[in-house]
Amino acid sequence: MGVRFTVVAAPAVLEALILLAGSAPRPAQAQLVAPESSRPARDPPPPMFSPWYAESLGDILKLEESDVARLQQRLAANPEDFPTRLKLMAYHQRADRAGRKEDRAQRVQHALWLIEHHPDSELLHSPVSRFSPGELTPADYRRAVALWDAAAKAKSGDAAVQWNAASFFQDLDPERYMRYLEATAAADPNHPFALRPLADFYVLSILGRGQLAARAQAGLEASNNVWVLGNAAYMFQSQYNRMFQMGVPNPRAAELAERYFLRAKALDPKLSRQAILPQLDPQGIASARQAELRGQRDWEARAGEATGKMRRLPVEAFPELPSAVAGALRNRNCRAPQPSARGAPRNVIRGQFFAKGEAGWAVLCSVNNSTTLLAFRNDRDTNPDTVITSDDRNYLQGLDGGNVGYSREITAAGRDFIMRHYRAYGGPEPPPIDHQGIDDAFLEKASITWYFHNGKWLRLQGAD
């Protein structure tokens, strides 16, 4: 299952690749510097996962318990069915199930099976095989440690195995994480994903002066990997710059950045100091802060102007409204705020918001720069529920062309929408869904779904 990647690059792009290399578990780029006479053109960084990986995850949010039962039967018949195993692990890690003890236990057992039988599997550096402290029982953790130790010793030269072990322990055991990253770099000095995380770990451990500081310092001192040294120099400089901007510069970070840059440059004289050790301009920082303050003041002024100029439509713009509902809105002096200056009227919607089979209305009612979400049970309702009231300024944002505009819209949300977003993002567990909810969106940002249940409006997870 595992694939060992080796990529070689011309050093002219080395500093760029150092800066672009990402930390685990995201894909990174790191290349081995070849001798001057044998430097080939750069290959693109390899993908972290095979095409079937993404294909297997396509329907995870749609899986019901009956589907999972069939997948479990399929895997029992063929334990080597990796797409099916991935589906099950992803299902057990789904936001609506991740907090359940039984789901977590199932995912742990899948991971342990993979470690024992396929320690080089790409599933083991996938998020489905990542665990936080406390998610494994003491017995399962001891077994994982033993299995990884055995696999790493049996395949000490297999970078895929070492990288998988490092990924597994990243959030569980800092010492093992560092040790397996070092083993990955030793097995493949050009590993596409491990070198930047190793450099970052060294730097943060050294500057943090914790229990692993001396060990990290020794590891970095012993390294002759230009990618580790160059990334470490960049990270030291980044930490210095960050602390400088906070008003508490750390001269030691700058000194170490210089030290390891010189060591990296000794391995590749073409490294760019400016790229690896970006320097701050104090005057530029001060100017940027002043510009930020001016921008905030300008935003306040423009927001106030935009609130006054919002397009708000009268009840007459919605002739589909029944007379009882329209009359109730007129009595409140309601005008429906619009998320655009043009286009069809919005924010007056029809749906079964209280009970299945009973169609009513939901309306955004703006009065005095404040908007209330009103919910009408049916066409005869003259006393709507107030779901929520908010300041219109809260829904302003920058639009194309430097304009500021109102960006709120409501839509009817069915069971599929509600359950899909709950399964993707978690949040409060929905009750049994037998009618529609109201999705209340801050466009291009996020939404809340309001759902009426047992006489109350529940705030459920919407888009994120």
Image: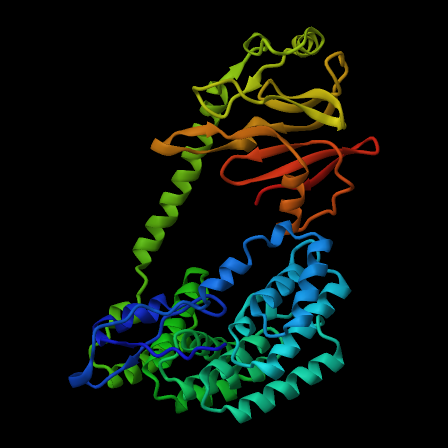
Q: Residue at x 42, y 88 (%)?
A: 186
Q: Is residue 168 left or right of residue 436?
A: left
Residue 10: % across, % down:
22, 75
The C terminus: image quadrant: top right
Identity of the residue furthest to the left in this view: 37
- Say whether residue 39 is visible: yes
| Quarter of the rendering containing residue 416 | top right
**206 vs 39, nearest the viewer:** 39
Examine the rendered structure and indicate whether residue 347 appears above or below residue 280. Answer: above
**163 vs 23, nearest the viewer:** 163
Examine the rendered structure and indicate whether residue 261 appears above or below residue 389. Answer: below
Residue 153: % across, % down:
54, 93
Q: Residue at x 39, y 65 (%)?
A: 241
Q: Residue at x 50, y 63 (%)?
A: 53
Examine the rendered structure and indicate whether residue 234 appears above or below residue 245. Answer: below
Examine the rendered structure and indicate whether residue 224 appears above or below residue 242. Answer: below
Q: Residue at x 37, y 75 (%)?
A: 231
Q: Is residue 41 left or right of residue 115?
A: left
Q: Is residue 271 left or right of residue 159?
A: left
